[in-house]
């Protein structure tokens, strides 16, 4: 189904994580890659709203789980596509969430994707537990944060969680940065995406990300982030040293 999987996560709400997911997907699709978005936020499946994709109701599942393809080389699968209305609450307990995510990930009719971006809810939830189990050792995680100390602390918490689950952290992207020269120089920060007024307005209008372009500064920073992500994936997962290797290094 897919060559590479990237989970995009944020420790708290309001970091613009879903906007980063959609922006990266559209960027790679324009570059000729086949990209999918799996909206793993089952309680607030908002990706269809951002892309202007209408809710089709449960009838759309009669022939199996089929992602939508709003533009060439771009597939989307979200619980929001199968609700009767966009505001219909989804209040499932853990076991049902596990089954649904497994179905979306493993049994949906995805095309021949190059990259699958998985948009997770803020914090650490049942969705995180399920996907870290299903994708252990076979995925990467990109942490989306703003420059506040709280957000960066939560990003570190998530990085530790996914490290224990054997999912390789690519790094942190600082989003919605208003400073021209961010004060953070941590090497784990892959890129900084500047605050963009177009995207801020787009977040309030249905389907806006498909209708226009952000400012040049954001586009350039996004391209840099996309290249850094591809490079990290090409290098592959960083496996921890075995006990034997540690002893050899120590002895040498």
Image: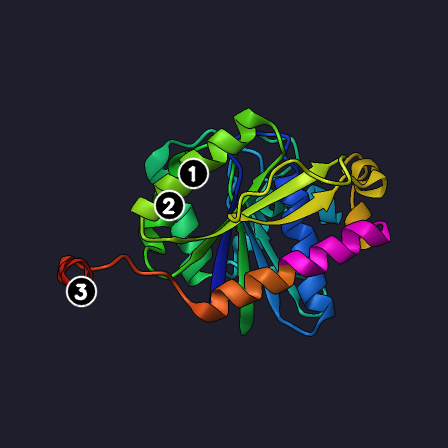
Q: Quadrant of the C terminus?
A: bottom left
Mark 3 falls on what kind of element? loop
Distance in Å between CA atoms under marks 3 and 2: 31 Å
Give the percent coordinates (x, y) of residue 4: 48, 66
Mark 2 crowdedness (10 Å alpha carbons): few <14, some 14-19, many ≥20? many
Answer whether residue 213 is magenta in the image: yes
Q: By what rule are the colours in the image chosen?
A: rainbow
> Residue sitting at 49 percent across and 65 percent down?
233
Q: Which residue is mark 1?
A: 158
Mark 1 falls on what kind of element? helix
> What is the number of callouts on the image?
3
Q: Are marks 1 and 2 in contact (CB under 8 Å)?
A: yes
Mark 3 crowdedness (10 Å alpha carbons): few <14, some 14-19, many ≥20? few
Q: Which residues are magenta?
A: 212-225
Give the percent coordinates (x, y) of residue 151: 55, 30
Give the percent coordinates (x, y) of residue 161: 36, 40
Q: Which mark is residue 25?
A: none
Left or right of 206 on screen, residue 73: left
> Residue sitting at 74 percent across and 68 percent down?
30
> Residue sitting at 48 percent across and 30 percent down?
153
Left or right of 61 on screen, residue 125: left
Examine the residues drawn in magenta and state their main secondary structure. Answer: helix
Q: Nearer the viewer, residue 53 or 120?
A: 120
Q: Are marks 1 and 3 in contact (CB under 8 Å)?
A: no
Q: Which residue is mark 3?
A: 252
Q: Which residue is mark 2?
A: 162
Q: Are marks 3 and 2 in contact (CB under 8 Å)?
A: no
Distance in Å between CA atoms under marks 1 and 2: 6 Å
Q: Is residue 163 above or below residue 106?
A: above
Mark 2 falls on what kind of element? helix
């Amino acid at each position: 189904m897919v060559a590479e999987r990237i989970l995009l996560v944020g420790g708290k709400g309001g970091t613009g994580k879903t906007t980063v997911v959609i922006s990266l997907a559209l960027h790679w699709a324009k570059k000729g890659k086949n990209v999918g978005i799996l909206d793993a936020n089952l309680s607030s499946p908002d990706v269809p709203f951002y892309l202007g994709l209408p809710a089709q109701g449960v009838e759309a599942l009669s022939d199996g789980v089929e992602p939508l393809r709003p533009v060439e080389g771009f597939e989307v699968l979200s619980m929001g596509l199968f609700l009767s209305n966009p505001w219909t609450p989804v209040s499932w307990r853990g076991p049902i969430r596990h089954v649904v995510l497994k179905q979306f990930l493993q049994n949906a009719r995805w095309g021949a994707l190059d990259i699958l971006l998985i948009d997770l809810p803020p914090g650490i939830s049942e969705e995180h537990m399920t996907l870290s189990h299903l994708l252990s050792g076979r995925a990467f995680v990109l942490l989306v944060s703003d420059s506040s100390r709280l957000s960066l602390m939560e990003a570190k918490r998530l990085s530790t969680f996914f490290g224990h689950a054997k999912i390789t952290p690519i790094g942190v992207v600082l989003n919605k940065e208003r400073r021209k020269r961010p004060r953070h120089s941590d090497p784990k920060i892959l890129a900084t995406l500047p605050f963009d007024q177009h995207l801020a307005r787009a977040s309030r209008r249905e389907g806006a990300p498909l209708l226009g372009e952000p400012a040049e500064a954001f586009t350039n920073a996004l391209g840099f982030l996309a290249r850094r992500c591809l490079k990290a994936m090409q290098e592959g997962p960083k496996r921890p040293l075995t006990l034997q290797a540690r002893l050899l290094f120590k002895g040498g």
